[in-house]
Image (cartoon, coloured by chain):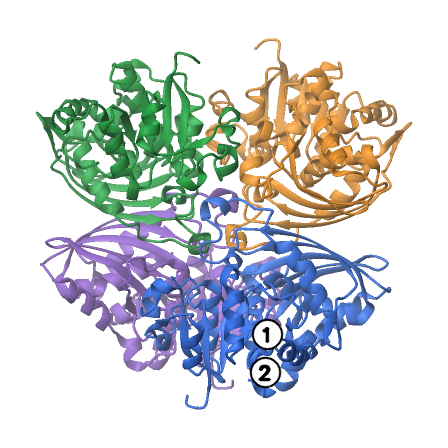
Chain colours: A purple, B green, C orange, D blue
Amino acid sequence: MGDKLRAAILGATGLVGQMFVKLLSEHPLFEISYLAASEKRVGKRYGDEVRWVLDGDVPEQVKELTLDSVDPDKIKNASVDVVFSALPSSVAGNIEIELAKKGLTVVSNASPLRLDPDIPLIIPEINWEHMKLLDVQRRRRGWSGAIVKNSNCTTAILVLSLKPLMDLAGLEEIYVTTMQAVSGAGYSGVPSVAIIDNIIPFIEKEEDKVVNESRKILGRLAGDHVVPADFKIYATTTRVPVIHGHLEVVYTRLRREVDIKDVVEAWSRFKGLPQEVGAWLAPKQPVIVRWEADRPQPRLDRDAELGMAVSVGRFEILENRLLRYVVLGHNLVRGAAGNTILIAELMAREGLL
Amino acid sequence: MGDKLRAAILGATGLVGQMFVKLLSEHPLFEISYLAASEKRVGKRYGDEVRWVLDGDVPEQVKELTLDSVDPDKIKNASVDVVFSALPSSVAGNIEIELAKKGLTVVSNASPLRLDPDIPLIIPEINWEHMKLLDVQRRRRGWSGAIVKNSNCTTAILVLSLKPLMDLAGLEEIYVTTMQAVSGAGYSGVPSVAIIDNIIPFIEKEEDKVVNESRKILGRLAGDHVVPADFKIYATTTRVPVIHGHLEVVYTRLRREVDIKDVVEAWSRFKGLPQEVGAWLAPKQPVIVRWEADRPQPRLDRDAELGMAVSVGRFEILENRLLRYVVLGHNLVRGAAGNTILIAELMAREGLL
Amino acid sequence: MGDKLRAAILGATGLVGQMFVKLLSEHPLFEISYLAASEKRVGKRYGDEVRWVLDGDVPEQVKELTLDSVDPDKIKNASVDVVFSALPSSVAGNIEIELAKKGLTVVSNASPLRLDPDIPLIIPEINWEHMKLLDVQRRRRGWSGAIVKNSNCTTAILVLSLKPLMDLAGLEEIYVTTMQAVSGAGYSGVPSVAIIDNIIPFIEKEEDKVVNESRKILGRLAGDHVVPADFKIYATTTRVPVIHGHLEVVYTRLRREVDIKDVVEAWSRFKGLPQEVGAWLAPKQPVIVRWEADRPQPRLDRDAELGMAVSVGRFEILENRLLRYVVLGHNLVRGAAGNTILIAELMAREGLL
Amino acid sequence: MGDKLRAAILGATGLVGQMFVKLLSEHPLFEISYLAASEKRVGKRYGDEVRWVLDGDVPEQVKELTLDSVDPDKIKNASVDVVFSALPSSVAGNIEIELAKKGLTVVSNASPLRLDPDIPLIIPEINWEHMKLLDVQRRRRGWSGAIVKNSNCTTAILVLSLKPLMDLAGLEEIYVTTMQAVSGAGYSGVPSVAIIDNIIPFIEKEEDKVVNESRKILGRLAGDHVVPADFKIYATTTRVPVIHGHLEVVYTRLRREVDIKDVVEAWSRFKGLPQEVGAWLAPKQPVIVRWEADRPQPRLDRDAELGMAVSVGRFEILENRLLRYVVLGHNLVRGAAGNTILIAELMAREGLL
């Protein structure tokens, strides 16, 4: 393991943290060398502190690791190569900035800073070019380290399905309604007494994230900033009694008429840097097209390509430029830990770590 | 009970049939005098044959009733005043027509014939005027009886929320995404192995029903037929792990700009014939406005006003004439048995039974 | 409402607190005059602070009430006639003792003190006689007020089914396995991510409660203390994805052979003080016998007699003195708020309030 | 693939059939060469006819296979080496007997014939010796082929946990209460409207199967028949809203006192023929001991060792010889297709195919 990159995970006991642990424990490029949790857990064994809810068990080699603090100095001294942040948004911003000041590279799933002009917000297949903002970031902020952001989970899944359409025919407006899994809210986020036999048609701040982040990710790099994409997008986000996997119903008006065959081909052929370089977590096909009348379904399709692919189905040209489809992805993998690790892997390959 | 109207229920053991039994057993105007089920059950005790899934128990007085056949002659001889049909759509059409020929009045929840020009498709608060089609029906078909239809469950809930908006500002286009309860598919319709921890983003024929029935119900009576409403409507229907209660997310572009206050007032003030005459199953408010950020929810709101009211929430003017809201209703009550019984009660009051 | 008894509810926003609110708001003998919650909520409107999860809405008259503190002096000054406690067990003990010292009568659902020798632990149909411990309590502790306890929810349901058997044939040993609803753990007790498509075969401290409380409730009053019943009882408690209603599978070896008819008759005839005096929350039949092969079921039977009756089914003499059956009850009603209010109503009728 | 054994699957579209397809499609010893389904599906593509509910997709190479008939002559002509039966019990008996008469070896998951004295009912780790009944079977019935049976799913999981205890200290009596997943009832077995937010405390014929099959499997071969084990066993079986994985709570009185350490060691060390020969589907440890207070859980533990291991937890000596524990296993794998394939693999290795 000597020549693997040393990774720290902040917020390692939470749900996204667990997925980081699961995916990194099998990753050929990284080794987990620092696990951070809240103060009261420092010094304790990861296997004892985590309330593991992913299928199977805590990876054997991680079980015995001792939880450490999120203190930037300590992390600095641990000489890690990359810091993965799954911190709660209430504390993430300051800690991540401290780490970047100290020269650490933070690849983060936390929401603060995502919309800052000099922070790359990256889905590698879509906008790897936005990584050039790191130069702007270092120049402006004077950091020796860096912060790169993963997007909101719902947004990540959505934009992967939108990008091929945008390239094909342009996007004029988008109406999206989501049905989101409970794991998207964290371990204690959705009490069972609130969601069994029920739907909660509201997720705090989620709709704004979908709107703003999708425009930034699909936007155009213009020197030192991103010009947001100019489509209109309206989002309604709901919580449903599903463990993992966000399903999204999308109506989108394209800028020119297309044939459904072109749409399917655009999705099927869609590829990006991760596929070109054959990254470990790169799905062969980032967008899988399902022809069955009743797919995609969360339980059947969320784990497609280890959870790194999104699945689209129920596509239909309803009228002229109006396309309807359904897209599904794994909120903890492509929507969180998986996409974040993919960013870091590509950074490593490009000498950015 | 001597002067109550004698009611037959066809398809009495199914889920909609159970709701007919529950509501009619407490109804001051009707008494259940004939229960029909499939041939193999004829002669057996209702309490033994029904797999009751509604809360509580089979009403005591109905438990002991003997199941009878759907044979039109037998029903005719039972001298019932009204026939409620919860028959499966595969057999409903022919049987209902036979009954109407024999002089019986059939108020039906089954889908066949709903779009026939001379068949009234009724949500009493919205289009009671369409009952005038009964004259056309009798004239054209030469029936001494009659057939009146209740709409598809998803449609009933949707149009109750749309009608006040149409009256207020006109409807240009509607994008609706539904999350429908499993009881909408009948007792065996959705196997648990298919829906626990899952969503099925497809319900056969449902989207066409929403499109066509909503246009007819909200259409204008023009002599011997209904001119469908001229809005565009796009529907995506999905099945979720919820027992009762369909939730629908609606984006609608109105024909003129309105203030959100006007929208709320339009919903709150909305009333129709059932409220005017004080029908037993008439909700005081057909459309209940919920101001909480996270309402309506199926488990909390489906039973509002005995399940006869729909609840709206999350309303917001997104841009100019574009309104977004969520509407919820009980698919077996307002969406099926309840609305059907309400039609019959009003027919009785108007001397049409 | 002037001559109703004034009731305080401590812990009014929690799940048991919500059930207290629901039941008391309809109760002919009590009026809610004081609602207490944790400090951060004091001064706020109940309707705004409660995350209501019971069917329907917060009762209109309670919505507007202002939350007050659990401070014993304040409660004392509010001159309430009875204090219902739904406090978390971590804080309940001290507060309740303070209140009793100040002369208030506390009828409590919280677990501390339940096994103290001078604290009556009451299921009114079973052991109302144990209320005589109040004299011992006052004498020993010098309180002008008093504390009476409701039992653990699982225990309450179990002992209602056991008492008729004990009277009939004596109990030698009991093996019980429970499947408990998530509402038994409080609003945030069971995260959905932990329980959807799952069972958790462990509930902290629950098994000891079942063992010790059932022996006390079914024990014999001997002067100043209760001699615990001398049967052996073994309990395994699990959590299942059900909202309300605990189901318990019971194997019990009786002390003498009986016929199953005698068992059924013992359950059916079982009555106690609440039935004799016709208390408002008294179920006509505390133990309902279900003959169907597949009952009782939580969703169908939990609300029997407003949730105050338990339902038994699947009874069978397996061998000689070995009886197997299943019992189900509503954990928040008979297992918590309902039984507690019933105790208070009977105290009022007997001049103990 | 030329030298793999050719396998037929009867009932290939059902849930157990799907698991046969999944496991055999990856098995190094077998290839799927014949897929049989009901008449109406014959001639159709497997991928089109199956309503796949297992995670992921139909294996690519199986998707294109054409469904064939269960006609014994046709199967005979297909020159398969082994027939796996997942037929419904209503038709399984006759078809399997016809196949055995024609010289085919049937390894069957269907319930008919399981208790016949000359039919081996096998859990390979426990009673492989019972395979000697095949000689008796051939002699008595004059078959050139043979029938071997897999046990009921609940029983398979239970006896794997009981066998080490029986060997350690003898079994006197067993009280078992099960919480069974919906997939145990087949695709349409449990309607969602019956089980969401609910428990059904009854599974037809299941309790007798547990009692009789566990006695046979744990019985002693005595020449031409099995002498059933002489413990008393009482079973209560319930259905819960869980997709896969049966959880069973066991109280058992051993024949002599033991230390809990001995119990744990007996489970941990337990091994049998599959482990000795290193069969492909053999779990390294057939019984996994979980020390956490809240394990095993269906969602976390059902897939342990590909679903071929059972997990035990919550073990405790309650009193003298009375042991309590919880055991969990995957009903479709160890409880059905997995165990059946393991039998066939061992038969192949021993020259019985």
The chain letter under disc 1 is D
Kind of residue at disc 2: Met
Mark 1 highlights which residue?
D148
The crowd level at tag 2 (other Cα within 10 Å; few <14, some 14-19, many 20+) is some
Relative to the observer, which residue lies in front, D129 or C118?
A: D129
Which label lies toward us, 2 or 1? 1
User: In x, y percent, where is residue D344?
Assistant: 56, 79
User: In x, y percent, where is residue B144?
Assistant: 20, 23
Height in image: C44 above or below C103?
Answer: below
User: In x, y percent, where is residue C208?
Assistant: 76, 47
Give the tally of numbered discs: 2
Name the side, left or right, on which D311 lies relative to A33.
right
Height in image: B158 above or below D262?
Answer: above
Kind of residue at disc 1: Val
The crowd level at tag 1 (other Cα within 10 Å; few <14, some 14-19, many 20+) is many
- Mark 2 residue element: helix
Label disc, if present, on residue D347 of the rendered structure? 2
Asked if disc 2 and disc 1 are in contact, CB closer than 8 Å, the reply is yes
Q: Is residue B302 visible?
A: no
The chain letter under disc 2 is D
